[in-house]
Amino acid sequence: MRARQALTAAWPPVLVAVLLLAGWQFYTSAAHVDPTTLPSPARVWEQGWENRADLWANTLPTLQETLLGFGLSFLAAWTVAVLLDFSAIARRGLYPLLVASQTIPIVAVAPLLIIWFGFGLLPKMLVVTLTTFFPLAANLAAGFAATDREAMRLLRSLGAGRLRTFRLVRVPSALPYFFAGLRVSITYAVIGAVFAEYAGAESGLGIYMQEQKSAFRTDLVFAAVAVTALLSIALFGATYLLQRLVLPWERAMKQEGRS
Amino acid sequence: MSPTRAGEHPGTDAPGPDLPRLDVRGVSKSFGPLDVLRGLDLSVRPGEFAAVIGPSGSGKSTLFNLVSGLDAPDAGTVLVDGAPADLRSRQVAYMPQKDLLFPWRTVLDNTALGLEAQGTRRREARKRAVGLFEAFGLDGFQGSYPFQLSGGMRQRAALLRTVVLERPVLLLDEPFGALDSLTRTEMQLWLAEMWQRYGWTVVLVTHDIREAVMLADTVHVLSPRPARVVQTIEVPLARPRGLDALADPAFAETERRILDVLQDRDVLPDRHVPQDRDVPQDRPAEAGIR
Ligand SMILES: Nc1ncnc2c1ncn2[C@@H]1O[C@H](COP(=O)(O)OP(=O)(O)OP(=O)(O)O)[C@@H](O)[C@H]1O
Ligand SMILES: [Mg+2]
């Protein structure tokens, strides 16, 4: 029953993807396109598989930067959102700056971070953090603020102080918002890491793409892009798993609604 | 009027013989230009079941917010066992109009929430709450989520969350307002039995005249906004009351008296309230039958 539903949901995007790939394959072979301009999907797959050891060796650093940067972003987002929630002064002073910070182009910042922090892990982590922080913090802060006023009063009448009210009501009511923000920002995370590597790195998918591009191995650039996409999709899927663990009642509620 | 009851609650003994448990004196409250309460007096003895009945929007929930200490009155005093109402003194357990069960907590965790909120350790809180599950007809639903409960069970869970605190005064704001009439009658009989068993001091807000007469020792009738108690009516029915109380002529007579007060306050001999009629109201004074 549930498996069938999952299949029903999955086949339209799969069909579209297959059709696109088929069209691409047909075009490249029918029009005899030069593979350094646009390789066929079959060639991308074949060459990607042949160079899998290289690809894998470059995937690992990217994944590491992504996860560490995202972890940092997670900590920073909670800290800032809690601060905003507790202090009206912080809200007035910090929030506009946070919004303004979103207008700074990361293209300009990434090379600077490399200049300041070198070619190691840290500047890449920071780029990932910068690109993912805002949706996380903003959603979390919105979630705290959206807590039911009556529920807050109930807690007060029961005898809870500010901290306990925060823990017992504000955090749980903000969690669905948090997961919404998590899904937005996790899709930026891998791209952020790849981009940071582009600006300068020793290894990673970003630098790999750049090297292959210089060597006119467009097929391997595409293979690396495919790996990047798979990573993003996997992380995106992981947020649903996490949500299911943290908010088991949501699932119970949905199932009840279905039956 | 005060029948002996088995299992008198230890926390509900009065500090003095004549001291009311709850004493509301000349309380006024407005929200901006809106006068909600004006000069409201009301007093409740220890172990008494009091009902407050009044038109929609007359300020019943506002009164409870003052008694619980959530809000402060503009004038007048609210005394609980002789001391001014204060959140920190934890004298009053308030069950608000909405049940406010949290969807992310299981039923057991919801009923333990009150204890957790006042600082009881989680394990201890759950242990105490679970002890009441059978009496509240919730046994077997500890691990369910609130959305899986019927309306009546939700109300019982919210009530359990409130009474497990064992505070001297229970404020129940229309606990059965959202229930169908069959479930509501069932819940009323059940609440009467629980009150009999535990000896709580209860103040119940209701729209329902029959509910007030069925459950209360004393019914305080409010005027429309700005509200005050226009009349206090003792219910002359024996305890314990069951469904057969409905057949008692005194039941219908008391209902009738309350209805008269609600519908035509001007006939009251002791007070004259002409200005209420001239004040524009967003809702007309209802007779309280829904
Ligand atoms: N915090 C508030 N700010 C402004 N107005 C309020 C506030 N609380 C209540 N009111 C107003 O005061 C009046 C009385 O409200 P209250 O909720 O006490 O009435 P009630 O008797 O409990 O009504 P109901 O029977 O519908 O529950 C209403 O007109 C309401 O809009
Ligand atoms: Mg109300």
Image: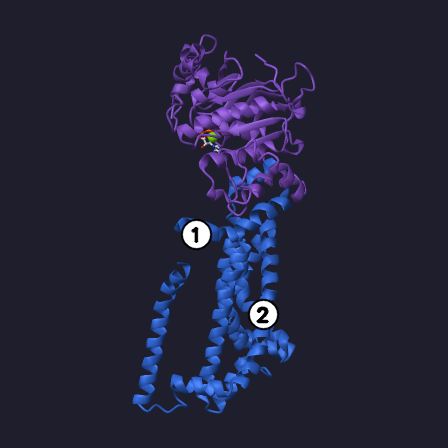
Tag 2 residue = A67
Q: Position of residue B266 (x, y in %)?
A: 41, 12
Q: Residue furthest left?
A: A30
Q: Residue at coordinates 59% horizontally, 41% vertically from top-left?
A: B113
Helix or strand or loop: what does disc 2 sit on? helix
Against A231, residue B211 (above or below) is above
Residue B201 lies in quadrant: top right
Horizontal side of residue B277 vs A203, given as left or right: left
- For the C terminus of chain B, give its image quadrant: top left
Q: Is residue A16 left or right of residue B217?
A: left
* Mark count: 2
> Which residue is at 55% across, 19% downward?
B42
Image quarter hosting the N terminus of chain B: top right
Viewer-nearest of labels 1 and 2?
A: 1
Task: Please tell me which residue lies in front, A3 or B49.
Answer: A3
The chain under label 1 reads A
The relative height of residue B29 versus residue B19 in the rendered view (above or below) is below
The chain letter of the blue chain reads A
Q: Nearer the viewer, residue A127 or B242?
A: B242
Considering the numbered disc 1 on the image, is that residue within a helix, a strand or a loop?
A: helix
- Crowdedness of circle 2 by 10 Å Cα count: few (<14), some, many (20+)? many
Amino acid at dot 1: Gln
Residue A97: horizontal and vertical position, in percent?
A: 55, 60
* Chain B, chosen colour in render: purple
Q: Residue drawn at (58%, 27%), measured in percent from left and top?
A: B170
Residue that numbered label 1 is attached to: A255
**Residue A111 percent location from the top left of the image:** 57, 78
